Image (cartoon, grey):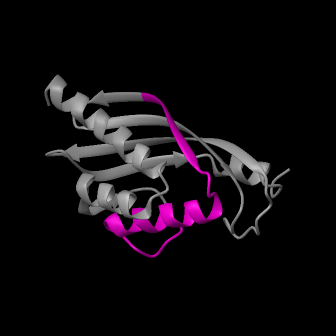
Amino acid sequence: MSADEQAMNKQRFQRFHDASNTHDEQLIADTIDELFDPDVRIRTPMPVESTGRQALKDVFGALHRAFPDLHVTVEDLIAEGEKVVGRNVITGTHRGEHLGLAPTGKRITYQEIFVFRFVEGRVVETWGVVDVAAQLRQLGRLG
């Protein structure tokens, strides 16, 4: 993969997160439809029954209901071959049910790392590590 293609894939990774920060459900759905293969393989456990692009739409819908001010800041982006790795910092205020917890009104900050594999400009596979323990600790569920 050329350096130009890698740079474009990094821009696509950022664009996906920029769309999620708008909280505009239609823009997020359209961006997912544009950037992700319909049958994208998501290798991270997800709290939804759906698969492919629909799973991403469902997860972001749930996150935005739980944290209406959710914001993803992409801190680092690394591209190698057909993969882009991003380290993100997420902030938000717990205003809706999340992981079985009723809203607490607490502000949380946590980190995640995601790997997106691109083929012909579309994400075909993802892997992620989300610091759920940090979420639960800040929401009072873990000591």
Quadrant of residue 11 within the rendered picture: top left
- Per the image, is 42 magenta? no
Whether the magenta-drawn stretch holds residue 50 is answered as yes
Judge from the rendering whether residue 97 lies leftward or rightward of residue 124; answer left or right.
Answer: right
24 lies left or right of 93: left
Looking at the picture, how far across and down is residue 73, in whole percent? 52, 36
> Furthest residue to the top?
3
- Please state the horizontal and vertical placement of residue 97, each as a whole percent of the image: 69, 69
* Residue 103 appears in the rendering: yes
What stretch of residues is rendered in magenta? 47-76
Q: Residue at x 49, y 56 (%)?
A: 23
Quadrant containing the N terminus is: top left
> Along the horizontal axis of the image, is 77 left or right of 90?
left
Q: Position of residue 33 (x, y in %)?
A: 27, 60
Q: Is residue 102 above or below residue 3?
A: below
Q: Is residue 46 visible?
A: no
